[in-house]
Amino acid sequence: MMTLIGIVTILLVLLVAWQLIRIAELSAEIKKENLTGLPNVKENDVQGKLLFGFLIFLMAGFLYTVVAWGPKVLPTPASVHGEKTEFLFYLSLGIITAAFLITQPILFYFSYKYRGIKGRKASYMEHNNKLELIWTLVPGAVLVLLISYGLATWVRIMNPKFDEDPIVIELYAKQFGWTARIAGEDNKLGYANARYIEDVNILGIDKNDPNGLDDIVVQNLIKIPVNKPIKLKMRSQDVIHSAYLPHFRLQMNCVPGAITEFSFIPNKTTAEMRNDPMVVRQVSEINNIRTAKGEDPYEFNYILLCNKICGSAHYNMQMVFEVVSEEEYKDWLKEQKTFAQSI
Amino acid sequence: MANDVLTPEVAHHTEHHHHKETFWTKYVFSMDHKMIARQFLITGIVMGTIGMLMSILFRLQLAWPEQPFPILKFFLGKWASEGVMDPSMYLALVTIHGTIMVFFVLTAGLSGTFSNLLIPLQIGARDMASGFLNMLSYWFFFASSLVMVISLFVPDGPAAAGWTVYPPLSALPQAMPGSGTGMTLWLVSMTLFIVSSLLGGINYIVTVLNMRTKGMSMTRLPLTIWAFFVTAILGVLSFPVLLSAALLLLFDRSLGTSFYLSDIMIQGEVLSNTGGSPILYEHLFWFLGHPEVYIILLPALGITSEVISTMSRKPIFGYRAMVGSILAIAFLSFIVWGHHMFVTGMNPFLGSVFTFTTLLIAIPSAVKAFNYLTTLWKGNLQFSPAMLFSIGLVSTFITGGLTGIILGNSALDINVHDTYFVVAHFHIVMGLSAIFGMFAGIYHWFPKLFTRMMNRKLGYWHFWLTFISAYGVFFPMHFLGMSGLPRRYYTNTAFPMFDNLADINVVISVFAIAGGIAQLIFFYNFIYSAFRGPKAPQNPWKSNTLEWTTPVEHIHGNWPGEIPTVHRWAYDYSKPGAPEDFVPQTVPLSDEEKNTFHN
Ligand code: HEM
Ligand SMILES: [Cu+2]
Ligand SMILES: [Cu+2]
């Protein structure tokens, strides 16, 4: 049905376009109008007004999308560094929105105001050093602010200083899925390489490295404690993937042949996040859509996605991160098998 | 103006003194820059149509996943046997769409057309420095396009690792179907493309430096020429690096080297490669890749400068600042490539440096935007279709440029990198702006390309439908990105958290289809006008530049007599005291004028 509607619409639009062309040609022929070259005064008037009309469309569209779709964007960040970047993000967004809301009206208003109607003569003005200096310095000053704030934030994220040693967790990507490895009691990951992969040893952990024996390998779901620093170390088995945890505002590529890392402190448990007003609203919107389609209801979870093109199922690599209290984390950890136990 | 007496008859007459031409030397293996410009343009438009059609196919999939469409089956055959696109085919379409748009349409199609057409005509030269190299440049481009199109038909499908073709995905045939023969052809095609682009670029540089007519000092060059000149320099300095990246990739694929490969197990097989790094490839790729976006953008900005000034009947505001900002942008574009790699695990200090240089580019860009706005101020605006597209360019250049301030800031890029926020950003600032610049150029210089005029009314329809759809397609993508939606996803249905974005995707696809259909108006106008449009007058836009002093009919050598001498800059519009609102560059300076700032 949809297809049929689609095809009919396309055909109709084609027909309309073709008819419009014919009409334009015929009417011009009748009126002996010149349809090429410089526009006449009337056309300048019309186009100038249309440009002003476009400004209204643009501003209305902007407002509509912000109101209708703004509530769909990512909810409050769930990590300590995420809160810092969120502020910078909305500060930058505010500044560029202001610039957008100033420059676009100027552009279309000038286009309208100085449309080439009868008797208009352009002024001869080739430069003005003072003006040009102003619009070099003002953006310059704003940028100095954004750059220094940005770099200060970046440096703190990339070289974090924590009060306690972070829990080391490996994220391992392959076509097409995630595996995580918690460093275990000693908080040290055993050496691993694709060459050692066999049977249950899906991460290729070196059996002769004592550091690896207490490592804990999990798939599909990992629990992490709230308010504890965590150091993620990424590896890949085959092609480049990217570990993307949007709710923590965290992303790092997984590069075959290298180990990359990203440290963070999750500061809201999954349960807390499920009660966040913005999350509640989004989840209920999603569930309205899902029930209408007869699908299972959705419950909020922190999700790990792949965000670097990696092959045909790139669109479906997921793992749940559950942020829990420290006790729950410890209990959960006890239930898991260590590497030594599993081989 | 002495040249005005040159009627087409006289021009035609002079042409007969030249050696006789056959169909082959005139239309196919031509060495005349005007014919080569047409060849680039038409090939670019054909490739653009393919690229656009692909985008509509994958937009169908994104808006209505799981919904069968006969049109998908028709175009994709076994890749959509039930009418639903196969995931690898989705990636292939996105990859080839990106490759075609970036390289074939907006590099060769744009620069190739307008540098070829305008450099000799606007600087007052009889042709390019080397007509032969110029011809070769086109034929390499043609061969490259052909190979790319052929790659669409290989059994495993074309390259599908994204237009950036990062290894190991692109290096290992086991990694995805497109990384077999399709990828080999992609590399062959791009190698031919790079050769074409180098031959063209060297020619443009030499011609601008050595073949300007008497009086055409560098500071009197129209901004179009400045833009083409700097673009050519960017290309000559950066394309060889892409070539080396492609060659090393070819070695890794066929000779068993390990430049980009290390410790890999794929499809259950452990590869023997060690010691390589795909990050090396990323550095090499983006060393070209970032200048490439300016290779795309600068010519469009040059065209816009020319059109806005002419059609505002006003000098371009701040000529020297415009040239300065072109140079500043070009210089900076070589030291910002790392902003594509903030989350690759690159040394954070390096990331800081790239953030700094990247955000600096905003300053010359802002200067350009403000100078356009000021050129419109107190003008006498003539809304030809070219002018409308130029105004559209200024709008998209600002909108898209602004989001770059977020992406360039490494701390913020962590979260929006590789999401639809990026797709929105680069389409608006580079895709739309450059396409608009290209349309502006076609409408404006159609008389010089095809000796006839395009229909203005159809141009208006084309502009408005295109402009509205363009914003309709790409503005909503910002919200997808801010919701954390990754790009290059075949479908978003695997994650329930994205279910509430489905309506946005439908809006985008509807606008994309509308925008695609709007291009039919352009095709009609283009083809009809090229054959049947009214003959162009000598100087239809009352413009100052030299190309409008050549006879309307194309002749070898461009000017039948001597090449005119240039006496002033290109922007004396509405000069006080002048009898008309334009003063061509060939009019000698009066005594008072000799002491003014611009002459
Ligand atoms: C006809 C209008 C167009 C539409 C509807 C469109 C739409 C899209 C979409 C939806 C994607 C896929 C995003 C993803 O999954 O990552 C994409 C990718 C891309 N497009 Fe377009 N696009 C259009 C025109 C253009 C133009 C004019 C350019 C020129 C710069 C362009 C360059 C690209 C590039 C470079 C990519 C990235 C390909 C990749 O991910 O490897 N597109 N386009
Ligand atoms: Cu992946
Ligand atoms: Cu870049």
Image (spheres, rainbow, N blue to C red):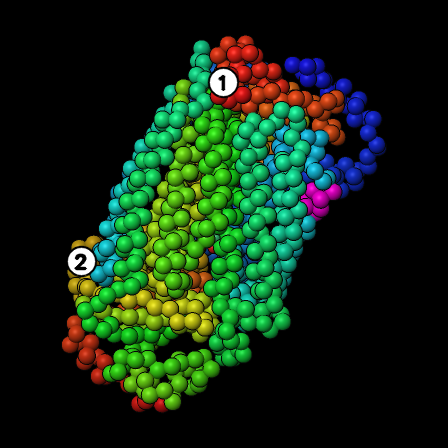
Camera-side residue of B162 and B152: B162
Magenta-highlighted residues: B132-139
Taking the magenta stretch, the answer to whether it contains residue B553 is: no
Q: Residue at x 28, y 70 (%)?
A: A231
Residue type at the position of mark 1: Thr
In the displayed structure, B368 sits above or below B55; it is above
- Say which element carries label 2: loop
The chain ID associated with circle 2 is A
Taking the magenta stretch, the answer to whether it contains residue B135 is: yes
Give how far across and how far down residue B36 sits, in percent. Answer: 69, 39
Give how far across and how far down residue B83 sits, in percent. Answer: 51, 58
Instruction: Name the front one of labels 1 and 2.
Output: 1
Give how far across and how far down residue A72 sits, in percent. Answer: 28, 51
Q: Check disc 1 and report the residue beneath it.
A: B596
Residue type at the position of mark 2: Asp
Q: Residue at x 52, y 28 (%)?
A: B307
